[in-house]
Amino acid sequence: MAIRRILTVPDPVLKQVSTPVGAVDDDIRALMDDMLETMYAAPGIGLAAVQVGVPKRVIVMDLAREGEEPQPRYFVNPEIVTANRDLLPYEEGCLSVPDIYDEVERPSQVRIRYMNYDGEQVEEDCEGLYAVCIQHEMDHLNGVLFIDHLSRLKRQRAIQKVKKAERQREDEAEEDEAPSAAAI
Ligand code: NI
């Protein structure tokens, strides 16, 4: 297993529509293992493959609370079968839009169909945080970020903030490197 780099906005790969997976084979399982490790290290509760630069319809998730046993979930080619009409507002964040949180409204219950880690077809009802998270992750598979549900102004402000924070991190990294470079 390996921790992969998580892409952040405005990386154009995040806007790509992910392609369906033919079969859950060892390559896909290795990808899911890496994604889970990457998600835990971030830390986050859900991650789509496109966020690590692999535009395939694969998602990992773990909604266990602190102190609970890990409950990893794996979704390959997930589809929404039905969604109810009640909308639930929830304060969302995203590993690809670090440190930005805002409220998004989504159907409060959805029924989904997907293949699991073993390639078995599963159909399941989701509600609460599970419903929020699976819809957020499935948006990623269609190149949609949670900030795309916000106003244009809020979206642009979020992207600028992430870009600025990224630049600051790079500058700090360069400063850290300077003494060792001078010592050579
Ligand atoms: Ni996300």
Image (spheres, rainbow, N blue to C red):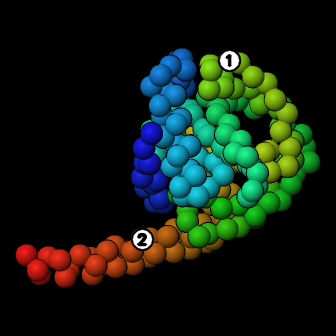
The front one of 27 and 71 is 71
Amino acid at circle 2: Glu
Residue 150 position (above or below residue 112): below
Question: Residue at the spot x=54%, y=58% of the render?
Answer: 42
- The image shows a total of numbered marks equal to 2
Question: Residue at the spot x=19%, y=82% of the render?
Answer: 179
Q: CA distance from mark 1 to mark 2?
A: 40 Å
Q: Which residue is mark 2?
A: 166
Instruction: Give left or right: position of 131 versus 84.
Output: left
Dividing the picture into quarters, in which one does residue 59 lie? top right
- Secondary structure of residue under mark 1: loop
The x and y percentages for residue 26 are: 47, 22
The x and y percentages for residue 139 are: 64, 44
The x and y percentages for residue 28 are: 49, 27
Residue 76 position (above or below residue 108): above
Residue 120: image tag: 1
The front one of 148 and 80 is 80
Residue 95 position (above or below residue 50): below
Dividing the picture into quarters, in which one does residue 135 lie? top right
Residue 26 position (above or below residue 133): above
Question: Residue at the spot x=49%, y=70% of the render?
Answer: 162
Quarter that holds the C terminus: bottom left
Quarter that holds the N terminus: top left
- Secondary structure of residue under mark 2: helix
Q: Which callout, 1 or 2, points to the residue nearer the camera?
A: 1
Amino acid at circle 1: Glu
Q: Residue furthest right?
A: 86
Instruction: Give left or right: position of 45 versus 160.
Output: right
Question: Which mark is first along the chain, 2 or 1?
Answer: 1
Badge 1: residue crowd in 10 Å (few <14, some 14–19, many ≥20): few
Question: Residue at the spot x=47%, y=31% of the render?
Answer: 30
